Image (cartoon, helix red, strand yellow):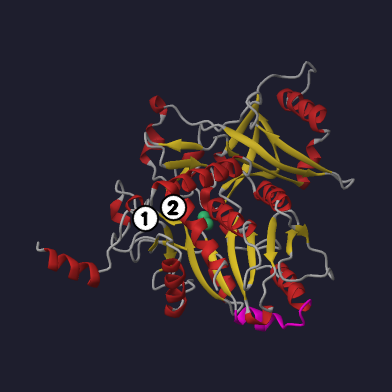
């Protein structure tokens, strides 16, 4: 190929480059230091409540204060609002009035997991178990035999809230769901992956030593005794508990080059942290910067703490009231980055993706113009104008990014909070980090893509 031809090609073709060919040593150091912060955040945020608590801690360190209705706000003010300790909204008030819109980044902090049932405890053949009801889209077989921790709260009748976190400390026990030995799984092997682990078999082993008293359910009695001594609870208290089993895995670097990060709950705490890091560094933005860490995305954004909840209107409406601005006018002029993960092209399973439009590891922040399934059903299809606006911002700020589509046409699909933001008359686009093994108990992302997603969100907050 002659030099001239290659120059024409460079000019006329859309050619993507591996991110590592695009950044210098100095920025590589920024990637590393950013990811150190993320790893520490993820290790401490295995439930939405923990993600919110960590978010508040980080925000307060950076001068954010709890928002109270009626408080005085001026450009540069930094506030946060905790929605029932399960979702978090933060804002940095902009120089321009809210009638000109805000810049919103919306991620979610709930992840697929195994919730305990409300009457979870039982004993069978002198083994004590907790029954679970899985939350979000999981491949049930992935949860067998792996080490589990128990996180959550028990709300007592007297109004007290007991925090539970067992398994995280190295001296704690862990919990486990058993699986059949291969020597005896002739029948199990014949079943499809969907059938061979029925939901009602996801029962967690929690004890085997019987009580000395000669009664039935002696093991259960002995375990309940331990729980009562340690946490002051009785079996009835499970009725008003939110306890969840999550993988007892620490976040680790992956590969000889340490380029990847494995952890539980990258979906979507990797984008939640990117937003948080970006808004915590935002000072005096042109337009008000808003960061949302929502709950319940994995089950359809339902509930008071999900993105469909009016809690968002309440917070944004209050901010608008302080400036005498109509909320509907603010929404109509706002831009929302629906920050959520997407599928990273996996060369071991190439058939589910269409490689010209799949997100690739180390190619940067992924923008999805649309998500959904089939003929773009249940998708927020962002406008060409919104995509162009991001192209401009990213080009001006050297953000490495890629356009992505989740899987081949008719292969399946997925959604995010994007459509619920767009329903509010807010221009919205999906963007986030590509993930390998999404929704597995231990997911994997690239450090480079994590950093670029943060850099991209920061650039949008800083738009002039
Ligand atoms: Mn997600
Ligand atoms: Mn998800």
Picture coordinates of residue 429, whole percent (x, y): 49, 70
Between discs 2 and 1, the one toward the N terminus: 1
Picture coordinates of residue 436, whole percent (x, y): 41, 48
Q: Residue at x 66, y 67 (%)?
A: 284
Q: Quadrant of the C terminus?
A: bottom right
Which of these two is toward me, 165 or 269?
269
Give the residue furthest to the top: 212
Q: Residue at x 62, y 26 (%)?
A: 170
Give the residue furthest to the left: 1
The residues tagged by marks 2 and 1 sit, at their Cα atoms, a distance apart of 7 Å
Region rendered in magenta: 322-333
Q: Image quadrant of residue 205?
A: top right
Q: Image quadrant of residue 277?
A: bottom right
What residue would you read off at disc 1?
363
Q: Quadrant of the N terminus?
A: bottom left
Q: Are marks 2 and 1 in contact (CB under 8 Å)?
A: yes
Q: Is mark 1 within 8 Å of ligand 1?
A: no
Q: Please, what secondary structure does the residue beneath circle 2 have?
A: helix
Q: Is residue 171 above or below residue 351?
A: above
The numbered mark at residue 371 is none
Q: Is residue 290 left or right of residue 402?
A: right
Picture coordinates of residue 406, whole percent (x, y): 40, 61
Q: Is residue 73 above or below residue 132?
A: below
Q: Is residue 176 left or right of residue 389?
A: right
What residue would you read off at disc 2?
449
Which of these two is toward me, 407 or 333?
333
Q: Please, what secondary structure does the residue beneath circle 1 have?
A: loop
Q: Image quadrant of residue 185?
A: top left
Q: Is residue 326 magenta?
A: yes
Q: Residue at x 52, y 33 (%)?
A: 146
Q: Residues within 10 Å of mark 1 (few under 14, many from 20)?
A: many
- Answer yes or no: is residue 10 visible: yes
């Amino acid at each position: 190929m002659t030099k001239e031809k290659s120059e024409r090609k460079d000019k006329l073709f859309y050619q993507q480059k591996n991110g590592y060919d695009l950044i210098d040593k100095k920025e590589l150091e920024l990637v590393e230091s950013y990811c150190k912060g993320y790893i520490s955040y993820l290790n401490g945020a295995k439930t939405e409540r923990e993600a919110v608590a960590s978010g508040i801690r980080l925000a307060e360190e950076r001068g954010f204060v709890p928002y109270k209705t009626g408080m005085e706000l001026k450009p540069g003010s930094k506030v946060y609002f905790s929605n029932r300790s399960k979702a978090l909204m933060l804002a940095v008030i902009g120089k321009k009035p809210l009638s000109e819109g805000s810049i919103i980044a919306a991620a979610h902090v709930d992840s697929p997991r195994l919730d305990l049932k409300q009457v979870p405890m039982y004993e069978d053949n002198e083994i004590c178990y907790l029954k679970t009801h899985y939350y979000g889209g999981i491949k049930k077989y992935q949860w067998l035999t792996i080490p589990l921790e128990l996180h959550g709260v028990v709300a007592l009748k007297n109004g007290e809230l007991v925090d539970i976190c067992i398994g995280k400390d190295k001296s704690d026990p862990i919990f486990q769901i058993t699986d059949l030995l291969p020597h005896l799984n002739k029948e199990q092997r014949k079943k499809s992956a969907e059938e061979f682990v029925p939901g009602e078999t996801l029962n967690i082993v929690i004890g085997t030593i019987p009580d000395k008293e000669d009664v039935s359910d002696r093991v259960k009695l002995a375990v309940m005794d331990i729980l009562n001594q340690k946490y002051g609870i009785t079996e009835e208290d499970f009725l008003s508990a939110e306890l969840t089993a999550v993988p007892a895995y620490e976040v680790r670097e992956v590969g000889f080059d340490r380029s990847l990060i494995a952890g539980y709950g990258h979906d979507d705490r990797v984008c939640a942290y990117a937003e948080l890091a970006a808004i915590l560094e935002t000072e005096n933005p042109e337009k008000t910067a808003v960061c949302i860490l929502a709950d319940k995305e994995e089950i359809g954004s339902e509930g008071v703490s999900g993105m469909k909840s009016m809690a968002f209107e309440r917070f944004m409406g209050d901010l608008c009231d302080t400036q005498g601005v109509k909320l509907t006018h603010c929404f109509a002029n706002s831009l929302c980055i629906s920050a959520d993960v997407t599928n990273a092209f996996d060369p071991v399973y190439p058939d589910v993706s269409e490689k010209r439009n799949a997100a690739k590891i180390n190619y940067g922040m992924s923008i999805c113009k649309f998500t959904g399934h089939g003929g773009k059903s249940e998708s927020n299809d962002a406008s060409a104008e919104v995509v162009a606006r991001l192209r401009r911002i990213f080009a001006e700020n050297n953000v490495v990014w890629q356009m992505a589509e989740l899987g081949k046409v008719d292969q399946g699909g997925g959604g995010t909070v994007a459509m619920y933001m767009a329903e509010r008359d807010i221009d919205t686009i999906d963007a986030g980090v590509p993930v390998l093994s999404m929704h597995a108990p231990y997911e994997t992302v690239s450090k480079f893509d994590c950093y670029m997603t943060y850099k991209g969100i920061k650039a949008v907050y800083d738009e002039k």
